[in-house]
Each structure stands twice: as C-alpha cells, then as structure tokens.
Image: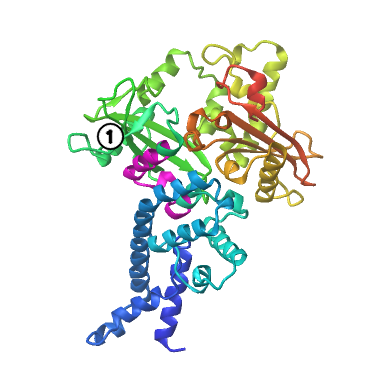
C-alpha cells in the first residue's frame, strides 16, 4: 500500500470514529483526496496532510447531514399523514413503506443500493419487501422491534435530540406535533425570532452573566453546558416575547442523562425577569427566597453544601451525584442525620419552613460503590428497563422518554447490595399528547440485586411536589 492509499485509509477511519452518528459514506475520504490531487494541482498532491483531509471530510459530512435533516423536515408531514391514516408503521402496506423509504432516500438520509433496488423491484415478493424495509428502518433508528418504529422516532434518528436542534427547528416541531396530536398543554408557545427582539446570542450571554453573578461562579463554570434557548409567548401574555435559556449538564459520555439544569428568562428587551406564567423566577430572586425562608448554615449544612458545591448541585439532585460522592455523604453526613432523627428533636434539621426531608431521605440508606464481585451499572440498568417493559407493559419507545435516571448503589445490607434506579421523564412535552398524557405523570423505581441480577422491586407511582411527604421522598432514594 503506497502513502496515498495509507492516507486515504486513515482518513476513512478518522471520519468513521468522529462522525459515527452521520450517514456513512465510505468513499468520502477518497473523494476529498482525489479533489485535492486533480490535474493541475501537482504541488498540492505532495503537501495535503491527512489532518486537513479529515477536516475537509468532516465539513462535507456535516453539510451532508444538515442537508438531510432539512430535506427530511419537508417529508415529515406527508409521512405523518400516512401514519395517521394507516396507524402504526408495523401495519403499513408495503406500498406505503416504499413511500417512506423513498422519502428517506430523496432526503439523503439513506443511500440507494442493492437492498433498496430489491425493495422497489417488482420481481421481489411482498414478504421479502417488508423484511427489507423493516431492516432498513431498524438499522436507521437503532430499534430492535418494528413495533417501535414511528415517524417521530425516525425524525429523532435523522435530526438528533431536540436539545441539539436550532430554535427554529423546535418551533417547526411544535407546529407539527400540535397538528397531529393537538395542544400538548404546555404553558408556552414557541415562536421564531424577529428583528425587534433581542438576538438568541445576546439572550444567552445575558442569562449566563445573571447566573454567574447570582451564584458567584467563575465565567468558565457554564462552559461545558449544552445551551438551549427558545423564544416564546404565553396565553396570559401573547404579545410579550421572552427567551427561555437553559444551561444543561449531561453526565459525561451520555446524551440523555441530564444531571442538572439552570433556567433564566430573558425578555425581548434583554431584561432578566421572573415569569409567573412559567413558574420560573430570576436566579438572584431564587437565592433571596431561600434566605428569607431561613435556610440554615450550621456546620452540618456547611458540610452538605460543600459536597453539593463540588458538582454545582444540591440535595434535590442527590440521585445524579457520582456514586463516590454519595458514598462520602453516607460516611460523613448520614450518621449525624440519623442520630438527630432518632433523638426525636428535629430542630437541627429545620431548613426553611420545616424539617429538611431531602436530607432525611438521603440519609435513610447507606450508599457505596460496587466491588469486583458486583454487577456493573450498565447491565443492571438494562435489566431495570426490561423490568419496566415487562411488568408495566411499556414499549421501549416510552421507556426511552424516561431519560432522567437517578442511580444509587445501596449497601445498607452489605450481603445483598442493590442497584437502584428511579426513572422520570426527560420532558413531559415529548409524550404523545404532551402534558395531557397521564403516562407523563408517572415515575418508576427498580431495584436490582447487584450480585445475582434479580429484580428485587419494580414500582410505578405518580409524581408529587417534592419536600412535602417523607414516604414519597423515600421512594426516590
């Protein structure tokens, strides 16, 4: 293999590793190198580096993926009209499945080849055509059962999670979903920006400054957050435009495990405001409210705040603390809290209007980290999700909507350690029918024996306001 061929091979490998989520094109790197070495560019043939070729290839693939997403947006409504007429994809006649595959080809999402040729070949029998179409879509969406395939799932496979979309795309998607599912009950209506409104970039900058100032953070604190900004109005104030700016932190290596989020409302004039229509107050007002409620600053709470501050979190998000930090809490804080509870005098735990149920609930059990003898988290989580589907009859597409997962490793009984998972929706808006769908109000808790993989507990319960009921709070730990 000469240097030219080696370089082409390296480019292909690099592109595959960096852009695994994009439509694969094994000839792209070759085309990039060829384009740089066409007749009349003899000097470039010797000077083009593999790194530059990778950059050019990535740029071309990014443009290709963007174009595919834009073209698919034009196909979504016609495809959902078929879905509305024919029902779930699994029951579509082959003629409609062919229409869907053709739309994906025309959008550039999938590439025509031998399989698609057979799909559209009149000589191919109908059963085989169904098999081909189903396999193409299973591969595209990453699903394992055709019953899980839908136009929505295909859209997410093509365009990615909605948090990664542009604000305009989220407006478009809201219009589409309301067209087919009706009003989702959300208090806000997303709208596109207009020249008289402060820009998205300026709204983000103002929101970031507000958080940094309120919490005393450094300017780099929010650098790793995924920023999602939407311009909206509400029914109560349809002429008052505001930006909802969210700084989202996902667990490292995950695109759906949301650990924490900070929300700031910036109005059309660039003012950080409270929005009672949305139930959101300014960062500074939030801190002032906590002070007025008489938040304690005892030595015990200073320890708790210091632990939470190491990951910019709080006790309400205890389930997304690293296992090592939960273990440290169990060693240092929990024994003190349990001693206070056993004494019967909860005065040291008064934090605001009454006893701090977050601290009490987090101290009920003892947490640790798994040993070599224990099952790893990933397979335990897979068992937990299967238990949700089997016991409660949930489809995998519904389970996927429960992206906020609290994780604990419970060693209260050292001889029978437990993986505990509490599942809550990433977004109630994402459910069919949105906020009006009763499923969006449900949470799930599954406990797995870390040594045997046995499901020890699986329960379903309705969401309640946090901090009011200890029995309910304990279900979240």
Q: Position of residue 270 (x, y in %)?
A: 23, 30
Magenta stretch: residue 168 in it?
A: yes
Q: Residue at x 39, y 62 (%)?
A: 106
Magenta-colored stretch includes residue 157 = yes
Quadrant for the C terminus, please.
top right
Up/down of 239 relative to 4, above or below: above
Range covered by the magenta-colored residues: 156-178
- Identify which residue, 130 or 16, lies in the foreground: 130
Residue at 21% of width from left, 29% of height from top?
269
Please name the colour scheme applied to the rendered image: rainbow
Q: Does residue 59 appear left or right of residue 253 in this picture?
A: left
Position of residue 246 in the picture relative to residue 202 (left or right): right
Instruction: Give the labeled residue for mark 1.
Output: 206
In the displayed orientation, state which residue is furthest to the bottom. 2
Horizontal and vertical percent position of residue 162: 42, 44
Dominant SS in magenta: helix
Task: Give coordinates of residue 297: x percent, y percent.
Answer: 50, 19
Q: Is residue 312 left or right of residue 233?
A: right
Q: Residue at x 59, y 23 (%)?
A: 358
User: Is 59 located above or below residue 326 in the figure?
Assistant: below
Residue extending farthest to the right is 415
Res 343 → quadrant: top right
- Please tell me how crowded label 1 is: few (under 14), some (14-19), or many (20+) other residues with Cα within 10 Å: some
Dividing the picture into quadrants, the one containing residue 217 is top left
Q: Is residue 242 left or right of residue 104?
A: left
Q: Secondary structure at mark 1?
A: helix
């Amino acid at each position: 293999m000469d240097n030219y061929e080696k370089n082409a091979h390296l480019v292909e490998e690099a592109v595959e590793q960096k852009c695994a989520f994009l439509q694969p094109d094994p000839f792209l790197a070759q085309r990039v190198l060829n384009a740089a070495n066409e007749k009349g560019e003899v000097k470039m043939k010797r000077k083009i580096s593999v790194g530059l070729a990778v950059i050019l290839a990535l740029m071309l693939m990014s443009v290709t993926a963007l174009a595919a997403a834009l073209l698919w947006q034009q196909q979504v409504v016609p495809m959902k009209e078929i879905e509305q007429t024919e029902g779930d994809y699994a029951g579509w006649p082959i003629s409609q499945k062919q229409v869907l595959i053709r739309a994906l080809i025309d959008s550039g999402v999938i590439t025509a080849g031998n399989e698609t040729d057979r799909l559209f070949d009149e000589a191919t029998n109908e059963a085989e055509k169904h098999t081909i179409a189903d396999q193409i879509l299973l591969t595209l969406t990453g699903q394992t059962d055709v019953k899980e395939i839908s136009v929505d799932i295909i859209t997410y496979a093509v365009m990615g999670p909605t948090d990664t979309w542009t604000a305009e795309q989220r407006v478009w998607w809201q219009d589409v979903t309301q067209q087919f599912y009706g009003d989702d009950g959300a208090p806000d209506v997303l709208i596109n920006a207009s020249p008289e409104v402060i820009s998205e970039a300026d709204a983000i900058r103002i929101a970031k400054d507000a958080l940094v100032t309120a919490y005393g953070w450094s300017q780099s604190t929010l650098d790793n957050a995924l920023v999602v900004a939407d311009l909206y109005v509400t029914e109560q104030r349809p002429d008052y435009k505001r930006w909802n700016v969210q700084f989202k932190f996902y667990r490292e290596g995950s695109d759906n495990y949301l650990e924490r989020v900070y929300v700031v409302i910036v109005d059309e004039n660039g003012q950080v405001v409270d929005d009672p229509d949305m139930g959101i107050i300014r960062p500074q007002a939030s801190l002032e409210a906590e002070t007025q409620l008489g938040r304690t600053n005892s030595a015990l709470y200073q320890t708790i705040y210091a632990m939470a501050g190491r990951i910019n979190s709080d006790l309400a998000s205890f389930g997304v603390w690293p296992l090592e930090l939960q273990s440290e809490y169990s060693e240092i804080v929990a024994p003190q809290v349990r001693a206070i509870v056993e004494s019967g005098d909860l005065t040291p735990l008064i934090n605001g209007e009454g006893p701090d149920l977050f601290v009490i609930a987090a101290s009920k059990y003892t947490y640790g980290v798994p040993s070599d003898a224990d099952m790893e988290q990933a397979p335990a989580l897979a068992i937990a999700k299967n238990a949700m589907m089997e016991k409660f009859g949930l489809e995998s597409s519904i389970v996927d909507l429960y992206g906020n997962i609290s994780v604990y490793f419970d060693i209260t009984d050292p001889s029978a350690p437990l993986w505990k998972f509490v599942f809550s929706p990433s977004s109630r808006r994402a459910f069919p029918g949105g906020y009006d769908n009763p499923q969006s109000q449900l949470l799930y808790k599954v406990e797995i024996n870390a040594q045997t993989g046995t499901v020890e507990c699986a329960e379903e319960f309705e969401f309640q306001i946090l901090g009011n009921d200890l029995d309910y709070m304990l279900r979240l730990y």
